[in-house]
Image (tube, helix red, strand yellow):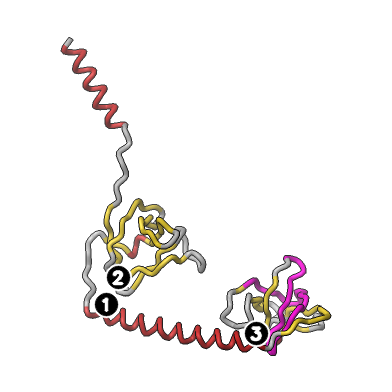
Amino acid sequence: MTKRILTLALIAVMALTLIPTAHADWIMYVSPASGTTVNLRSTPEVNDRNLIAQIPFGTALNVQYISNGWACINYGVGAYDIGYMMVKYLTYDYVAPTAANQRKNTTNQDAQQQIQNEMGTQYDRMNEQFKTYKVVTRPFTVYGKPERASGYCNLRFAPNEKATLARRIRQNEMLTVIGETSRWYQVQDPQTGIIGYISRNYVTTNPN
């Protein structure tokens, strides 16, 4: 009987070890060498479209797991319950921002303000172009003319050098002009149907 009880107890212990334990987050702290902020992204990759927020130096984050150099963060931002941050910018030990870091943060704020000012200038230029916009009643064909024949020119979603890139246009690639501003053509790519803007300087009506 005693042997049977011991056997049952052993089986019970083994069974308990096989039961998955509840997942618990652990705390890590944002600690980039720059002493400023680190990007939190919606997917574990670096691209221009998945930025959720910029997390300040020293912020405590709830890490769910780490995989392939990325930490999965339990961090509710807007519609996002989780985000991803490169684990090389995190540490297990809290490091208080130093005076040097604070100076870096001030420099970063100045840089951010400069970027905002530049963006404001670009929006003003874009608006100026939209004010001159008119529809082309008789669409015509133009061809890509990059500065170098082996290079490309940019098709953008708005008439501005800083506007989002729609696609790249190669030498002699055909486009249909459907609208125009003082400096840009609004064109449609007949192959893909994409509509965007291209500088008049980078197209020609005569292919080479």
Q: Are marks 3 and 1 in contact (CB under 8 Å)?
A: no
For badge 2, the amino acid type reads Phe
Q: Looking at the figure, which quarter contains the C terminus?
A: bottom right
Q: Are marks 2 and 1 in contact (CB under 8 Å)?
A: yes
> Along the line of sight, which residue is nearer the eye, 145 or 72?
72
Mark 2: give few (<14), some (14-19) or many (20+) Cα within 10 Å.
many
Instruction: Please tell me whether mark 2 sits on a helix, a strand or a loop.
Output: loop
For badge 1, the amino acid type reads Asn
* In the image, farthest residue toward the right: 138
Which contiguous range is marked in magenta?
166-192
- Up-down relation of residue 125 to residue 90 (above or below): below
> Along the line of sight, which residue is nearer the eye, 201 or 20?
20
Mark 1: give few (<14), some (14-19) or many (20+) Cα within 10 Å.
some
Which of the 4 image quadrants contains residue 163? bottom right
Q: Residue at x 25, y 59 (%)?
A: 92
The mark nearer the N terminus, 3 or 1, is 1
The mark nearer the N terminus, 2 or 1, is 2
How many angstroms separate mark 2 from mark 1 (CA)?
8 Å
Which residue position holds label 3?
Answer: 130
Mark 3: give few (<14), some (14-19) or many (20+) Cα within 10 Å.
some
Which residue position holds label 2?
Answer: 57
Instruction: Please tell me whether mark 3 sits on a helix, a strand or a loop.
Output: helix
